[in-house]
Image (tube, rainbow, N blue to C red):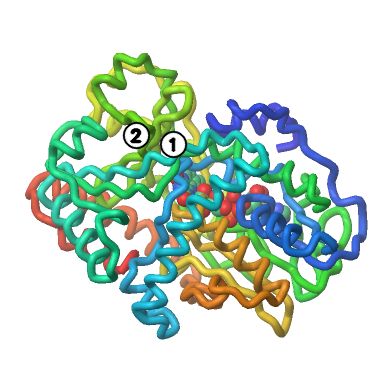
Amino acid sequence: MPAAYSYRSLSFWHDSVPDTLTPGDPLPGDVQADVAIVGAGFTGLWTAYYLAKRDPGLRIVVCEREIAGFGASGRNGGWCSALFPASLAKLARLAGSGRDGAIAMQRAMHETVDEVGRVAAAEGIDCHFAKGGTVMLARSAAQLERARAEVAEERQFGFGEESLRLLSAAEASDLAAATNVVGGTFTPHCAAIHPARLVRGLAAAVRGAGVGVYEQTPVLSLAPGRVVTQHGTVRADFVVRATEGYTPGLPGFERAVAPVYSLMIATEPLPPAVFEQIGLAGRPTFGDLRNLIIYGQRTADDRLAFGGRGAPYHLGSAVRPAYDRVPAVFAALRQTLAGLFPVLGSVAVSHSWGGPLGVPRDWCASVGLDRSTGVGWAGGYVGDGVSTTNLAGRTLADLITGTDSPLTTLPWVGHRSPAWEPEPLRWLGVNAGLRAMRLADWEEDRTGRPSLAGTFMGRFLGG
Ligand SMILES: Cc1cc2nc3c(=O)[nH]c(=O)nc-3n(C[C@H](O)[C@H](O)[C@H](O)COP(=O)(O)OP(=O)(O)OC[C@H]3O[C@@H](n4cnc5c(N)ncnc54)[C@H](O)[C@@H]3O)c2cc1C
């Protein structure tokens, strides 16, 4: 993608960011640094940001194949949430961290939402941060059961109504007046953001702090002490891999995560009369509790940006621009949105796009630093990376600078997800999983009871 104009067509967010998206300079040749970071998405940039804050004398280099914010960080649903892609019970089992570890992790995620807002304000990044919480609608008996189970798990770990509460049908409909609402959940721990404004603003802030952010600099390989790019080699004591869904393209990391696509649409700006009917006052992010995830936000300019999974996984973990666009998935999203809010039935869709997420084999994100090699990593956030990347960046900054902090003992630190199966097993497994979730939703719509396949997938993926 060499031309600046084509970056604008990546998503609604890229199209509406007040920035020319002109690529910055590539790496000028061989460079010596203290820390070399591969990838200028949220993970790489938050890591650079906090490292530069901790020690302004550090020489930090970020190498990005395209432009900062090219990947999922510029294209996502803008849920800056406290969601983490593993249940509290699963976190408690990680490395024997127990109940206290799971609770500490959840608290850290709650704080992270505010930390993102704090830094955006401090750096003058107008990312349209609106902390309106999240309403998850239950639109069938099976979904209501799932809502109750989620609230029950929070209570078991000592989190009360201020963390997650069950809603009656009337309360849920007040927040988002969708069809067939029988209840739901609400958490205040989420802000709707404009992700491209945040990631591009963050890139400018780290550049301002003296970090070298080199764009159009494809990394060919990374190893302890060095990052080899098309334009030269960066030698550094610490090397950080921050490539998420693109990771399998790096030699040696082919099976680290599976790139699974999430796709989105955005409507034209909607008149106030529409919001009088559908709610979403205060811009809460919203979805329902079906198995195959859907997610939406009311943007600052009164569009609905709405997305979901369901696009196929590609053999060999291939990632290509063409995979961002699947007309059948866009049509399904359009139909699902109109099913939620019939008033949107004839509303024009102005943008449709997508991008790859990184799914680790055990669906559990991780961050870490191998002290013996100086190689660090963070990723595997599945669809929950907007805020988790900030926690990852702070944690990597502490690990690299040898700072003792409560962050470096959280359960996800140092966790190693197993490698995915070789192909074609991986292709069969991931696509069968996506199909099972779609089937589970179909079954639940018809029977009103939780689908066995859905319960199994839920345990497999989150539990
Ligand atoms: C459509 C969509 C919707 C989503 N919605 C949400 C949401 O609402 N909330 C949420 O929390 N999460 C969401 N996510 C997930 C979230 O966006 C990601 O978890 C997060 O942005 C990951 O950030 P990252 O920096 O790790 O990866 P990325 O943003 O993907 O950045 C990786 C960067 O590395 C670069 N790169 C890769 N390989 C190389 C190489 N060899 N050389 C140089 N550079 C390289 C890429 O170009 C890219 O810029 C969504 C994701 C998608 C795709």
For the residue pair 98 and 213, the one nearer the viewer reads as 98
Q: Quadrant of residue 204?
A: top right
Mark pair 2, 1: CA separation: 8 Å
Kindly tell me whether residue 72 is visible in this rendering: no
Q: Quadrant of the C terminus?
A: bottom left
Residue at horizontal 81 percent and vertical 63 percent from the top: 228
Residue type, label 2: Leu
State the image coordinates of residue 423 (x, y, percent, origin top left): 49, 67
State the image coordinates of residue 378 (x, y, percent, origin top left): 59, 65
* Label 2 Cα neighbours within 10 Å, binned few <14 / some 14-19 / many ≥20: many
158 lies left or right of 67? left
Q: Secondary structure at mark 1?
A: strand
Residue at which label 2 appears: 333
Residue type, label 1: Met
State the image coordinates of residue 128 (x, y, percent, origin top left): 52, 33
Residue at horizontal 62 percent and vertical 61 percent from the top: 393
Report if the CB atoms under discs 2 and 1 are less than 8 Å apart: yes
Q: Would you place residue 68 above or below residue 361 in this image? A: above
Q: Would you place residue 311 above or below residue 362 in this image? A: above
267 lies left or right of 147? right
Q: Is mark 1 within 8 Å of ligand 1?
A: yes
Q: Secondary structure at mark 2?
A: helix
Residue at which label 1 appears: 264
Residue at horizontal 67 percent and vertical 64 percent from the top: 241
